[in-house]
Amino acid sequence: MTKKRKISKKRQYILKKQKKLLFLCIFLLIIVIILAYIIFKTNLLEQKINDKFVRYISFNNANTTDILKISNLQRKSNYHGKGVLNNSYVKFNVDGEKNSKFDIVVYPIGMKIDERNIYYYLTDSNDKKIEFDNLSNKAVSSDSGRIIYTNKISNDKYKLKMWVNSKYKGSIKNVSYEIKIKPC
């Protein structure tokens, strides 16, 4: 009878060790799944824009004199995107030789998302609507920007607001655009 007890005690000890090992494996698997979910859902692996570095490059570029940039676009409905509370905007003047043609061109500089979800609203200095559309409906320039407006110079002031469609479900972290005024 003593042998049977010793064998059953050994077996119980082995079973206890196996249960502990199984519990530890399941626990580690759950931790790995949770960490993977957190990393991919919070965009920890995405590149971030270093604004100081980007500005340094742009200011030292011989083709660029001024930087117009709209950073970190937010999700908004079209109504709110056009509204006063949209703080993703830039004001600028277009000066030059009268009646010369110019284009307003936007370029993505941050994370790129489908341009059907990027909207803009261009107004004059009196907040009168000039253009409202999404970027996908606009022509592509020779250097891969989107031409959102073409006109003749008359020393006007403009205000450009941009936002991401509120129905877009993907990440919008670091969605930014650079605006350039180019002669035609």
Image (cartoon, rainbow, N blue to C red):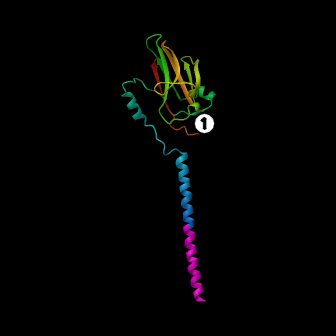
Task: Say left or right for 133 vs 111.
Answer: right
Q: Residue at x 60, y 86 (%)?
A: 4
Question: Between residues 155 and 116, which one lies in front from this camera angle?
Answer: 116
Q: Amino acid at mark 1?
A: Tyr
Q: Is residue 19 magenta?
A: yes
- Image mark count: 1
Q: For the point 50% across and 17% down, which residue is it?
A: 157
For label 1, the SS is loop
Residue at mark 1: 168
x, y percentage for residue 6? 57, 84
Is 154 drawn above or below residue 180 in the view shown? above
Q: Is residue 6 above or below residue 147?
A: below
Q: Nearer the viewer, residue 117 or 66?
A: 117
Q: Name the residue rendered at 38%, 31% in the picture.
A: 57
Q: Is residue 77 magenta?
A: no
Q: Can I make out residue 70 in this image? A: no
- Magenta stretch bounds: 1-21
For label 1, the crowd category at 10 Å Cα-Cα, with few meaning under 14, some 14 to 19 and many 20 or more, is some
Q: Which x, y percent locates residue 69?
A: 47, 28
